[in-house]
Amino acid sequence: MIGHLGDQLRRLRVANETGVLPRDLGVWLIDELARVASDNVKREARDQLLREAGELIGGSAWARAHRIAAELGTLNRRRRDEDPIGRAVRQAVELDPRCPTSHRQILRILQG
């Protein structure tokens, strides 16, 4: 475990210097950060991503909440051609898989 961590940190330093982050290293880093982050930190980051998605959607807060709920309902993590709204929603779920899916819960997040 320690050897693997050291290897990944070395790779991360090289990526930082070169400006090129290999996909597998990025995935590892996201997973590690999500693993060690507290539930509150994950929830705050998730809510911020959902609010950012909401800002990209026109209409009332209720309409934005419906759109985000629809995105959550049809989320496909393997989709590569998603728009910025879908990408923010997918990232929110990656941070916190217990992401709320009801319109009312999302509306509270958008208004918070």
Image (spheres, rainbow, N blue to C red):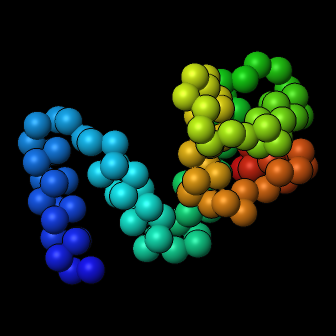
User: Measured from the top left, where is residue 104 in percent x and y?
Assistant: 90, 49
Can the viewer see residue 61 in this picture? no
Can the viewer see residue 77 in this picture? yes
Of residues 111 and 28, the one nearer the viewer is: 28
Task: Find residue 98 and report its image quarter.
Answer: bottom right
Q: Residue furthest top?
A: 58
The image shows residue 93, relative to residue 70, as above or below, that is: below
Question: Quadrant location of the N terminus?
Answer: bottom left
The image shows residue 97, relative to residue 59, as above or below, that is: below
**Residue at left offset 79%, top offset 56%:** 100
Lateral position of residue 18 relative to residue 21, left or right: left
Of residues 43 and 33, the one nearer the viewer is: 33
**Residue at left offset 68%, top offset 39%:** 76
**Residue at left offset 52%, top offset 74%:** 38
Lateral position of residue 27 relative to residue 64, left or right: left
Lateral position of residue 112 relative to residue 107, left or right: left
Lateral position of residue 54 relative to residue 36, left or right: right
User: Measured from the top left, where is residue 36 in percent x and y?
Assistant: 43, 73
